[in-house]
Amino acid sequence: MIIKPADSSPGRSTGWARGVAGLGLALGIVALLGMLSSGPLYRFGVLGLGPAFRLMGWGAKLGIVAIVIALIGLALALFARRGRYAGIAAIGIVLGVLACVPPWMFRHKASQVPPIHDISTDTIHPPKFEAVLPLRAQAPNASDYPGAAIAAQQHQAYPDIQPLQFNAAPGRVFDAALDTARAMGWKIHAQVPAQGRIEATATTFWFGFKDDVVIRIRADAGGTRLDIRSESRVGKSDVGKNAARIRAFRERLQQTLARS
């Protein structure tokens, strides 16, 4: 009698676990790459802003699909007792989550702040751009301050954005403000001590959005008053970025003056 060896090929459950886990991983990779590439593709002019945002959204949606399929793959792998495939499915789940979280956070933040993109510590007589005007010539957002309606939304959403008062002399504050702007990585376009004016451009990390900043420094009641305005060149909403930039500048400037 000839006894045939037992069939060593993977069982049906193992095959399903391998296939579904692999599919979840593949979709997770594609989703994450699509989401991450949206910013650089816009930044380097390959895609317009609308298509770039849609690509980011598609990446997030595909990430959700990847999570669902990878979870099924994980369950199948655990049922088949195949730790390797369970690991593959787990990676797919992680990649899907990474593809979903940044767009979700972006949308959530956008829903929490007003759709404005021009923030100033002085909304009655905001600092005016001069040196950066040629750079903004083709920008969708106008350089002129938009007025009382926008100011009202700003005050409601960002009540802490107020003029900065210092006991130091204007010259000292000007030097510290210039050092702070440089330390924050802004590109300086104008530094005019006689006018107390500094103009610069900040570039966001992912999409490379250009936001212009103008700082005005004046003597005030024996000390110094500093006003700062930050405006995005594109986009109806800045998703709170300009207010966050002013806060970061304020904190860093105060630290710089305290050390000097």
Image (cartoon, rainbow, N blue to C red):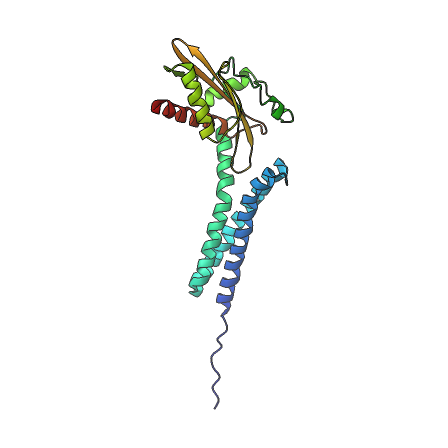
Is residue 176 shown above or below 80? above
Q: Camera-side residue: 2 or 147?
A: 147
Place residue 53 in its image quadrant. top right
**Residue 127 x/y as whole percent:** 52, 16
Q: Camera-side residue: 34 or 72?
A: 34
Residue located at (48% from left, 37% from top):
105
**Residue 100 x/y as whole percent:** 50, 44
Residue located at (44% from left, 25% from top):
179
Left or right of 138? Residue 181 is: left
Instruction: Say whether residue 164 is visible.
Output: no
Q: How many marks?
A: 0
Is residue 76 shown above or below 224? below
Place residue 55 in its image quadrant. top right
Is residue 204 shown above or below 145? below
Is residue 72 shown above or below 168? below
Q: Camera-side residue: 212 or 200?
A: 200
**Residue 259 x/y as whole percent:** 34, 25
Instruction: Say whether residue 94 is visible.
Output: yes
Residue located at (54% from left, 15% from top):
148
User: Given the current orientation, which residue lies at the most extreme right position?
Assistant: 138
Image quarter in which the C terminus is found: top left
User: Given the current orientation, which residue lies at the most extreme bottom position?
Assistant: 1
**Residue 247 x/y as whole percent:** 43, 26
